[in-house]
Amino acid sequence: MNFFNNTHAHRFYIVPTKRDKRHTLYSVIFNGRVVILGTHLPSVHGCRYLASMGLTGRAEMWDFTRPYARMVFPDLVEAADMTVEEEHGTPRVRALRECRQVHMHEGSDAGMDNHPSSHERLSTVA
């Protein structure tokens, strides 16, 4: 048994969709479906999507032009809890600081299953 050849990874693809003055926006594709439309952080949001599906382990971000992964994440759950912030013109990877607590209000659909695997609805992350 070869323990060093464990190359199974959850693979997602990115496609540039729009460019503005500050960012290029990307769509994220997983299992042949666009799951995120319009994000400037496709690596982070791709890993968050995979983690939201309950997937764990290694993840790879690919495009359709290179014969190799653009980025490799040894632990996609750990990568999902990170973000990229610009500091003095240089991008830095940092732990996510935003509050993850969700407040449910009476009459909201927050308790419903709105996961993209349940609906054909596309997610938009800006």
Image: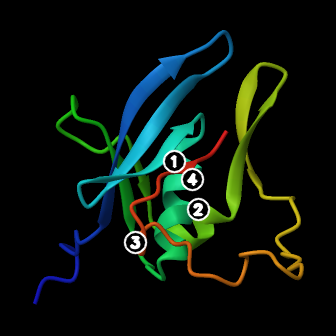
Residue 74 location in percent, x, y? 45, 66
Check disc 4 and report the residue beneath it: 45
Mark number displayed over residue 117: 3
Query: Quarter of the image holding residue 102?
Result: bottom right
Residue type at numbered disc 3: Ser
Of tags 3 and 2, which is closer to the observer?
3
Check disc 1 and report the residue beneath it: 43
Q: Tags 1 and 2 in contact by the CB under 8 Å rule?
A: yes
SS at mark 2 in the image: helix
Q: Give me the C-alpha separation between circle 3 and circle 2.
A: 21 Å
Q: Tags 3 and 4 in contact by the CB under 8 Å rule?
A: no
Q: Tags 1 and 4 in contact by the CB under 8 Å rule?
A: yes
Q: Give me the C-alpha separation between circle 1 and circle 3.
A: 20 Å
Look at 22% across and 34% down and name the residue there.
64
Check disc 2 and report the residue beneath it: 79
Left-right relation of 25 to 99: left
